[in-house]
Amino acid sequence: MKTQNNRGWFFVLPVLLLVAFNALIPIMTVVNYSVQETFGNNVFFWQGLDWFQQLLNSDRFHAALGRQFLFTGLILVIEIPLGIIIALSMPRQGVWVPVCLVLMALPMLIPWNVVGAMWNIFTLPDIGLLGYLMNHTLGINYDMTQNPLAAWVTIITMDVWHWTSLVVLLSYAGLVSIPDAYYQAAKIDGASNWSVFRYIQLPKMKTVLTIAILLRFMDSFNIYTEPFVLTGGGPGNSTTLLSIDLVKIALGQFDLGPAAAMSLIYFAITLLVSWLFYTLMTKDDAK
Amino acid sequence: MKKRYIIPIVYIAFLMLPIYWLVAMSFKTTNEILAGFSLFPQTFTLANYRVIFTDPTWYWGYINSISYVTLNTVISVTVALPAAYAFSRYRFLGDKQLFFWLLTNRMAPAAVFALPFFQLYSAVGIFDTYLAVALAHTLFNVPLAVWILEGFMGGVPKELDETAYVDGYSFPRFFVTIFLPTIKAGVGVAAFFCFMFSWVELLLAKTLTAVAAKPIAATMTKTASSAGYELGLLAAAGTLTIIPGAIVIYFVRNYIAKGFALGRV
């Protein structure tokens, strides 16, 4: 049992000060910019909600948002089941377990721009391993810089390569926590593999899967570096996801007002969807 | 060997292929790379690595990256420890709201914060220092560290605290000599994740540095665009960035999965 004690505030004070400095001040800066217009020289004019209105009606924003949802949707649909399948088929004990875990976790520790550069080298049409195989051995015309479909397939494959292991590690942690007695009982009852999965393994993995889905959602929704290094948002605008578009406006064109309005809407969408996921997945627990 | 093991084997092979290609490329000469396709390096060369280890703009990139990542890990875990203790032991006014607010910072797109951070840190005069990047990365690492540590601390029975007080321990002495050793696995996991997310992040690290604290990742992107496209050199630099992660991961291999599994949702 936890005790009611407002001394807790004293312990969270360092975190509070740090986060207040780090999150509140920048967010207030963004809010400030989002309602003003500037022509440089630090002269600002009150603009009201014009930037928000303009953004919500802009085709460019709708397109980037659409691509972002498509990307994140595909990522979740592929990585979550794939991660579960791999976790289910891994050995539960023995010398190979740490070997598997270390090798699988490796992609997650590679700097994101190196991931992008690595996949770029890997897929170059004439000198990359994958690019060469596709173009010269299989005879499929595959060039990311020309073909939007190839660019999409590549960024999706890259993210599956990069992050499926997170789902695997979390699911695996959930699986090894199931006592042997559960499986023995299922065996006596003559349960099929499917019922073992549906009624024993899946419920036990629920907590970790909630974390996995939330983390994968947040991170794929905020993704910037890997697709930026790999495709630069191209060909054309076909892989310009929200973050890439935002950085173009904020740091490239230095349009502070529109960029700030976009930032706030972007952040709000991330929060809203995360909250929806969280509420939907934990609503059974509350009963 | 069971038939189902084929799935993890194929998966690991898929993970290793691009890494192999990067490593193989780093041992090739520029001529060989541009000449065409070769599965193994034909003329094995260490020239790319020699450039990195002798040119200060390259090796300082690594030193800078390691410096701010270490600083960030220390700051994040230090401030997260007492906070996590409070969340796991006490109920206080607004604790749930505060916990959720902390987690929302983990959801913040880095792109949103890049420009305001640049202005804020320039204003307080820490732009282009290790501290700037380390502080910026606490934005997403502190919530994560609090979350993981709270999970581990929640697993320690409250009787431990009470017994210590009865035995006459003061709070700081209890925390350092009894409580910390009990949750050292949790501290290890939290430090691992802080290291990981700070090591791999580029957007903020690049925006907040110019020369003195420039991360290796930024050196790489700059080289890629300025000195033509030296793929071999880029591949060697990339290969070297994998090594710190591989070392850290080896130490926590038995705890990686547990780290999140114990955290509360």
Image: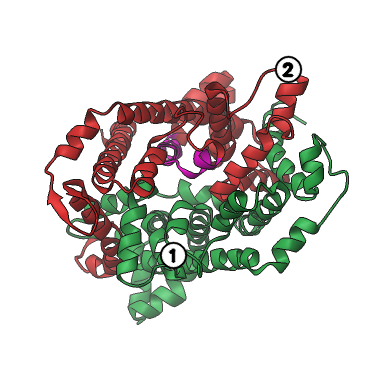
Residue B55: x %, y % from top left:
68, 67
The disc label shown at residue B134, or none: 1
Residue A238: x %, y % from top left:
46, 27
Q: Given the image, on which type of amino acid does mark 2 rest?
A: Gly
Say which chain tag 1 marks: B
Residue A224 within the segment the image draws in magenta: yes
Numbered disc 1: secondary structure: helix
The disc label shown at residue B51, or none: none
x 45%, y 36%: residue: A209
- Quarter residue B91 falls in: bottom left
Camera-near label (2 vs 1) is 2
Other-residue count near label 2 (Cα within 10 Å), few / some / many at <14 / 14–19 / ≥20: few
Q: Which residue is mark 2?
A: A139
Q: Nearer the viewer, residue A31 or B17?
A: A31
Quadrant in which the N terminus of chain A appears: bottom left
Magenta part, dominant SS: helix
Between the C-alphas of marks 2 and 1, the distance is 48 Å
Q: Nearer the viewer, residue B100 or B87?
A: B100
Magenta residues span: A206-229
Say which chain tag 2 marks: A
Q: Nearer the viewer, residue A245 or B244?
A: A245
Chain B appears in which tint? green
Numbered disc 2: secondary structure: loop
Quadrant in which the C terminus of chain A appears: top left
The answer to whether B219 is drawn above or below residue A60 in the figure is below
Q: Given the image, on which type of amino acid does mark 1 rest?
A: Ala
Tell me the red chain: A
Residue B14 within the segment the image draws in magenta: no
The answer to whether B37 is drawn above or below residue A135 in the figure is below
Residue A88: x %, y % from top left:
59, 31
Other-residue count near label 1 (Cα within 10 Å), few / some / many at <14 / 14–19 / ≥20: many
Task: Count numbered badges in the picture.
Answer: 2
